[in-house]
Image (cartoon, rainbow, N blue to C red):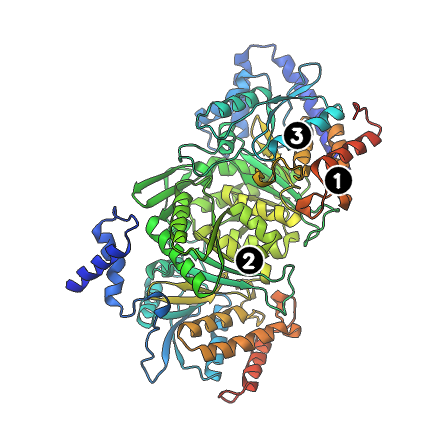
């Protein structure tokens, strides 16, 4: 934990220097900046047989904004804290337990004097018009970072109503979903010593929402796998593995049946793996993977996979470490980042009853603080949460205890206060 | 001609639900097999292929790759030892050849015999995509539309969860396994996942009938209809329609990610699960992992006229082949399912009881269960158990 932090601090210093240089350069005309960006992109992407149109589209937002981002995972330069040193983050409450948990996050942030302001954007999932979600997307484009609860997708609505969560992810091109499943010391589970990092492709695959019924009674769903996206996610996974000091990356696939689709994914992973000789790479079929996960999950280190397998595997891992209330998830794109709980549950049945587990959402907000380079606040909050986890009487119903959400949040705030940090009154 | 017409009329009458859009040729194609075979399946009044030659059944045996051949040999030896009236017709399928002759011979043999026992055939990823998975070819050609896997906690096997008893019904022919893929633009691959009303109704009906036969109370359909609205939405709709015809059986639905998470934390809540092909693959492997691994669970593939039995999780076990360390339990239990299907319950019961009593003995656990016994040790112990219970056996 400490070594991670010093590594990140060192990186932070380098990128801060780079930002200063870039801001000096921004005094020049925008055209020069854009041409330098384009030439840089041509250097960076020899693998992708770069279609220029694609490059320009991906860099589109960069040209118009002042934010220059490198393509490496985790080296993203956060937005400058413009207004009095305070960051503005979009907050999307969502449905079910989302609103109450995000209220708690806001409370804790206000209590710990974290320099983050939340811009709340409500998305009503019951409406068929897409205005709400478009507003949310604009807000995230403006702020660059968001924290969200899950938005419910009602199956009984006509198929033209697309999943709001999916729309968000694809419009903002949040191509990597990262989930870190770790056995927490205070939580009783059947498996111990699990530490798996799951990198899941977030925009294509089975979630393309392209379906049609050519003949009545026969539905075709299209699963799209593209070379560029597979290379991109594989690259992200290997970079992340390197950054976090991981040894092995396992690709999960079903290429014996979907030869072209998952075969392409596997091929791209292998290509990228050849550029990282220090990391071990292997591949496993998804059914064998899930079986191994259930019997022997300690063997996995970093896993990379397309969208649907990612969904299943991440839920299995979340179940192994203690349930949906404990694991945070992050969705990273080139320019934006959205943080949420990893298993994306709305928790409709426990909404409004003060029994939801706030850990996942609070840990997600810590990941957000890490992303904004507010490391001290992040580690403070994280330590408080994990200490709280060790006390069994503060466990909520989903991990077998009887504590309420407010009790857990209160004790976290007390722990933060006891560290001597400047806090507002309780 | 009249028989054909009668069958078509019958099929149209039987399926009023809404397959009106299907052209006649399709109906004929589905019924085509019925005309040639002589044993239409009718739920619980099913009659197995008659034991023609001296009261002995003939069953196709496909050894497969990896641990398949050695386990198939053990099954044959055990059947011979127990004087089971089954003769095996051995058909070897070489998975490294690109020609489809081998697998076509196997399919023809199964059409002739009606029942088969097989090991898994390996699908090499390095061969060109035109080379289809042999297992998949077998299942689709014979229209083995239902895969049934019964996962039960066995008393002697130590697992993290207890009291698991889940029956998994998985659609076996369509869904993501349609092998229809194309690359219209270089670097962009489209895989087609097909869900049809006919097949969804069929598998749902199979599931509810099986539930009724086995005294199951609840069926859970697993889907991802929030994302694949048309595809899994259709599947879900068909399940709901069929469920309305079985008011004694409770029916609920669960999204696949939530289902897998629940399986890992609390698998005792599930009774019977019904799902399309890919989710079935994942869920059945998770359940197999929960009850003790791939060496313990048998699987059955049922079609209108044919039945195929194999190890539930379809592993080739290449890394442990020929080392005498494979767990024969799954294959032996699959052969018991075969005997049940052939209406030879006494033999099935005898072999099953011996196998399960051997599995409960910890010193007879093979490496995958954490023990050190070899396959031959386990088989010997099963033989001893059978001999000691008294029925006629060959001399060892």
Can you see residue A413? yes
Q: Are marks 2 and 1 on the same chain?
A: no
Q: In front: mark 1 or mark 3?
A: 1
* Image height of A411 relative to A114, above or below: below
- In-image side of B389 versus A355 (left or right): left
Determine which quarter of the picture holds residue A146.
Answer: top right
Q: Which mark is residue A386?
A: 1
Q: Residue at x 54, y 46 (%)?
A: B257
Alpha carbon separation for disc pair 2 and 3: 36 Å
* Image height of A32 relative to A391, above or below: above
* Image height of B176 relative to B341, above or below: above
Give the residue at mark 2.
B287
Question: A218 or B377, which lies in front?
Answer: A218
* Image height of A190 relative to B345, above or below: above
Report the residue that reaches farthest toward the left.
Answer: B1
- Location of residue A50 in the rendering, given as x and y in whole percent from the top left corner: 47, 29
């Amino acid at each position: 934990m400490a070594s991670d932090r010093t590594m990140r601090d060192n990186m932070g210093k380098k990128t801060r220097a780079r930002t200063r240089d870039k801001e000096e350069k921004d005094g020049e005309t925008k055209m020069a900046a854009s041409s330098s960006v384009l030439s840089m992109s041509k250097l960076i992407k020899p693998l992708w047989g770069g279609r220029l149109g694609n490059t320009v589209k991906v860099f589109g937002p960069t040209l118009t904004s002042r934010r220059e981002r490198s393509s490496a995972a985790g080296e993203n330069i956060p937005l400058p804290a413009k207004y009095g040193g305070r960051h503005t983050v979009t907050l999307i409450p969502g449905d079910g337990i989302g609103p109450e948990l995000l209220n708690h996050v806001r409370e804790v942030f206000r209590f710990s004097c974290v320099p983050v302001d939340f811009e709340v954007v409500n998305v009503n999932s019951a409406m068929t018009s897409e205005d709400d979600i478009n507003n949310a997307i604009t807000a995230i484009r403006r702020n660059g970072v968001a924290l969200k609860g899950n938005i419910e997708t009602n199956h009984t609505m006509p198929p033209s109503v697309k999943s709001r969560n999916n729309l968000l992810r694809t419009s903002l091109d949040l191509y990597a979903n990262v989930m870190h499943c770790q056995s927490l010391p205070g939580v009783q589970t059947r498996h111990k010593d699990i530490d798996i990092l799951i990198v899941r492709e977030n925009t294509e695959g089975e979630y393309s929402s392209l379906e049609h019924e050519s003949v009545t009674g026969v539905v075709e769903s299209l699963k799209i796998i593209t070379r560029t996206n597979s290379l991109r996610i594989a690259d992200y996974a290997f970079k992340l593995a390197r950054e976090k000091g991981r040894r092995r990356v396992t690709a999960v696939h079903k290429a014996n049946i979907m030869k072209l689709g998952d075969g392409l994914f596997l091929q791209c992973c292998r290509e990228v793996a050849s550029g990282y000789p220090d990391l071990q790479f292997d591949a496993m079929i998804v059914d064998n993977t899930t079986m191994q996960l259930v019997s022997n999950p300690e063997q996995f280190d970093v896993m990379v996979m397309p969208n649907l397998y990612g969904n299943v595997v991440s839920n299995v891992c979340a179940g192994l470490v203690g349930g949906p209330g404990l694991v945070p998830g992050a969705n990273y794109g080139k320019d934006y980042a959205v943080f949420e709980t990893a298993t994306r549950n709305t928790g409709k049945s426990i909404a409004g009853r003060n029994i939801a587990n706030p850990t996942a959402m609070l840990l997600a907000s810590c990941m957000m603080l890490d992303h904004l380079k507010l490391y001290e606040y992040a580690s403070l909050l994280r330590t408080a949460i994990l200490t709280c986890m060790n006390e069994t009487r503060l466990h909520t119903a989903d991990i077998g205890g009887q504590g309420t959400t407010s009790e857990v949040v209160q004790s976290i705030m007390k722990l933060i206060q006891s560290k001597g940090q400047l806090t507002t009154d309780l | 001609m009249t028989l054909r017409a009668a069958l078509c009329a019958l099929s149209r009458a039987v399926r009023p639900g809404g397959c009106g859009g299907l052209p006649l040729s399709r109906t004929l194609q589905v019924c085509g097999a019925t005309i040639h075979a002589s044993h239409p399946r009718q739920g619980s009044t099913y009659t197995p292929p008659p034991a023609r030659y001296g009261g002995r059944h003939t069953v196709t045996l496909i050894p497969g790759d990896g641990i398949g051949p050695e386990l198939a040999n053990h099954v044959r030896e055990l059947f011979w030892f127990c004087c089971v009236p089954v003769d095996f017709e051995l058909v070897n399928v070489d998975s490294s050849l690109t020609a489809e002759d081998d697998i076509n011979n196997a399919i023809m043999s199964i059409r002739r015999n009606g029942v088969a026992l097989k090991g898994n055939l390996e699908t090499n990823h390095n061969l060109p995509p035109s080379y289809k998975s042999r297992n998949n070819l077998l299942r689709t050609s014979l229209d083995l539309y239902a895969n049934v896997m019964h996962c039960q906690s066995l008393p002697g096997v130590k697992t993290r969860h207890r009291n698991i008893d889940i029956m998994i019904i998985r659609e076996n022919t369509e869904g993501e396994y349609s092998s229809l893929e194309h690359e219209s633009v270089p670097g962009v691959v489209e895989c087609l996942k097909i869900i049809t009303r006919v097949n969804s109704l069929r598998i749902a009906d199979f599931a509810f009938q099986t539930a009724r036969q086995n005294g199951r109370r609840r069926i859970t359909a697993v889907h991802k209809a929030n994302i694949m609205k048309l595809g899994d939405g259709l599947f879900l709709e068909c399940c709901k329609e069929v469920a309305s015809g079985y008011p004694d059986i409770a029916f609920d639905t669960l999204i696949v990610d939530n289902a897998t998470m629940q399986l890992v934390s609390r698998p005792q809540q599930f009774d019977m699960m019904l799902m399309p092909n890919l989710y079935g693959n994942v869920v059945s492997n998770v359940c197999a992992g929960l009850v003790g691994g791939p060496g313990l669970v048998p699987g059955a593939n049922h079609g209108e006229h044919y039945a195929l039995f194999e190890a539930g999780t379809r592993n080739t076990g290449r890394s442990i082949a020929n080392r005498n360390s494979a767990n024969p339990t799954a294959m032996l239990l699959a052969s018991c399912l075969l005997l049940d299907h052939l209406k030879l319950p006494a033999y099935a019961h005898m072999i099953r009881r011996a196998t399960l009593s051997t599995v409960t003995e910890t010193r007879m656990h093979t490496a995958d269960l954490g023990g050190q016994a070899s396959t031959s040790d386990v088989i010997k112990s099963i033989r001893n158990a059978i001999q000691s219970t008294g029925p006629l056996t060959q001399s060892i």
